[in-house]
Image (cartoon, rainbow, N blue to C red):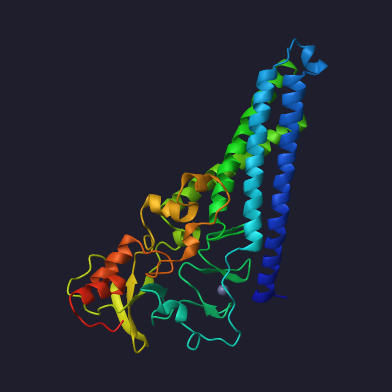
Amino acid sequence: MAISEERQNAMDKKANQIMSVVLPLVEAAGMGLATYVVVYRICLNALIQPIPKYTNHGFEPRRATGIGLLVVYLLLLVVFCITFLRLLQVIWTNPGVTPLGEPSSEKSTASTKHYDRLDAYICDYQGWPLWCDKCHSFKPDRTHHSKQLGRCVRRMDHYCPYAGGIISETTHKFFVQFLFYGFLYTGFTLIVVAYFLAERHRVLHSAPGTWVVAVALAGLFFLFTFGMFATTFYNLSINQTTVEVMQRDFVHQVALRGGNLNPPNTTSDQSVVLCEVSRSPTRSYIVVQTELGTGLWDLGPLANIRSIMGDSLIEWFVPLRMSPCLHHRDHSGEFPWGRKVVRLMEEHGAGTSYRRTRRRSGGAHAA
Ligand SMILES: [Zn+2]
């Protein structure tokens, strides 16, 4: 008997919820094993105070090396654990979901008040903000419906069971820090255990199973965290989420407030004006179709990174303050528009810059 789509989604959701608890526990168990091998078996039993198995083969105590490795390992472990706990805390308490609408809400009757303050927003072919049938509400720009959560998530990147949940505008910064400290911690563990495992195998002709498993786990998680960090940081530098990278070839519609249907200067890109819509007697928009999907919010590498990681280097490395992009202070859009969209607004005489220009030149404009 075929399983209904609703039931399948409910089962997937449950499975993802279980995995996002189980995988962090597996990672914690792996860290426990690595700590046992590095701290007890290598630093204490082999280096600081060698057990007879080592002294019988002529090993002298190597205290400076043992203490140095111990301090660096514990430091990396503590920083990584704090970052991981901060990420889990934000994922569980503030995952960045949008409010649910009333089940009776419909696109044609729901309030667009939120969008009326913006100079431009992503819309459908008729100029409506994008609508989620499941949450019964409009989706602010860059919001996507997560089937794992069953909710719309602001600036959704992806669902990561390894990190314990959703990566969104609230959790993205802590996810990047989790990956960064994760690859430092696993890289250090991999080098230390692999080096002393090789030494033990060469001199004592033994390779304990716990050491081999620790090397395998550290290697696996090092490759995973390093690869994810490199990809995530690159996406951050071009201000794109994983969802947007996958949708880079999609055509977008942007509603430009008070825009001119027939601008005097032709645009330099492939944008096409579809229609004009009136939200109220004093608010009108033109709907422009554009293929600028890859650069809608690109502010330049440094500004892109700062919008998530923070304005100072300390914020980049300390998992405390939330991302600046959460403030949504810029009224030109849900997120500050990139240069390409700003140019589009200027060419069509839309938005704030248009109103200022018209005001300065004494022209009347309804917006
Ligand atoms: Zn939704």
Q: Is residue 330 left or right of residue 143?
A: left
Q: Is residue 233 left or right of residue 214?
A: left
Residue at 53% of width from left, 63% of height from top? 156
Q: Is residue 12 above or below residue 197?
A: below
Residue 285 in view of the camera: yes
Residue at 28% of width from left, 84% of height from top? 366
Question: Which residue is farthest right?
Answer: 52
Q: Quadrant of residue 271?
A: bottom left
Q: Quadrant of residue 1?
A: bottom right
The location of residue 27, given as percent across then percent down, is 70, 46
Q: Is residue 137 above or below residue 57?
A: below
The location of residue 169, given as percent across then percent down, is 52, 61
Quarter, ligand 1: bottom right
The location of residue 145, given as percent across then percent down, is 55, 70
The location of residue 80, given as percent across then percent down, is 63, 43
Towards the viewer: 274 or 91: 91
Residue at 27% of width from left, 75% of height from top? 355
Q: So how many labels did they put on this image? A: 0
Q: Is residue 285 above or below residue 91?
A: below
Please state, as top left, top right, bottom left or bottom right, where the C terminus lies in the image.
Answer: bottom left
Residue 348 in view of the camera: no
